[in-house]
Image (cartoon, helix red, strand yellow):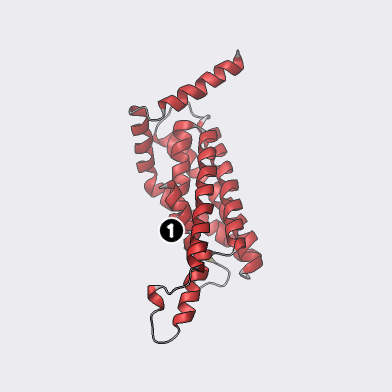
Amino acid sequence: MFTISVICMNLFANKSINTGLDWLALDCGIVLSWASFLSMDIIVKRFGAKASTKISIFVLLINLFISFVFFIVAKISGMWGEAFIEVGGDLVNNGLNNTLSSSWFVILGSSVAFITSAVINNTLNMLIGKCFKKKNFYEFSLRTYLSTIIGQFVDNLIFALIVSLNFFGWSILQCVTCAITGAMVELLFEVIFSPLGYKVCNKWEKEEVGKEYLEYIKSKKLKIKN
């Protein structure tokens, strides 16, 4: 789910949302970006911030590989199904190829934004969790909501400043409003699905998922202390 959400949200980011307001710009990446942050929060809860960041880097590499595959497919001579129309078929075909292949600046912007926000989200989630002695849904939801809204804001803002500002003609105001509004929308999704995330965490703990990894990390810490 983590990997799929990252790949899809970067693909969906190619489509802008018509908000009807000149000062407000959004893209369809918000439809699934919440899932990647919830995935990170679940991993942090069970395995810690370092583990979540490692998996985030792995997911980023998978996303770059898929982007390369999309690029190759787009360069293969041929026609997409939607391009078989009487008028404008070549335009449709080129549009689909360009969407899939993604320009280098889109890939750069999304990669920098994702990994930066992932580190911030994971670290903040862990630090907030340490402030609570009692581990329950309230603790999980609070650390998840706070880390998500800040992490999502950073993710949206970095992407907008690198890509949208320089290549899509957005204004600074649009970049900031997109970052804020996107973070709020994604937080709403996080609130809706956080009970599911908490249930997954409890299930992992009950079934001792990743027990070997946790024991390995614990043994490493003991060696360092000794």
Q: Which residue carries the number 1 mark?
A: 31
Q: Is residue 167 left or right of residue 5?
A: right
* Residue 226 in view: yes
In the image shown, does 42 or 7 lie closer to the viewer?
7
Q: Is residue 109 above or below residue 134?
A: below
Name the residue furthest top: 226
The residue under the point 44% across, 47% down is 2
* x then y, percent, for residue 125: 52, 38
What residue lies at 44% left-to-right and 32% top-to-bottom? 46
Q: Which quadrant, please, contains the C terminus?
A: top right
Q: Position of residue 91 (x, y in %)?
A: 49, 80
Residue that protrudes farthest toward the bottom in the picture: 87
- Residue 35: x %, y % from top left: 43, 49
Q: Residues within 10 Å of mark 1 (few under 14, many from 20)?
A: some
- Residue 170 vertical placement versus 31 (above, below): below
Q: How many marks?
A: 1
- The residue lying toward the viewer, choosing from 203 and 99, is 99
Residue at 46 percent of width and 27 percent of height: 213
- Up the image or down, 174 lies above or below 66; here it is below
In the image shown, does 208 or 154 lie closer to the viewer? 208
Q: Amino acid at mark 1?
A: Val
Can residue 27 be seen here? The reply is no
Secondary structure of the residue carrying tag 1 is: helix
Q: Residue at x 64, y 65 (%)?
A: 165
* Res 139 quadrant in image: top left
Residue 1: % across, % down? 40, 47
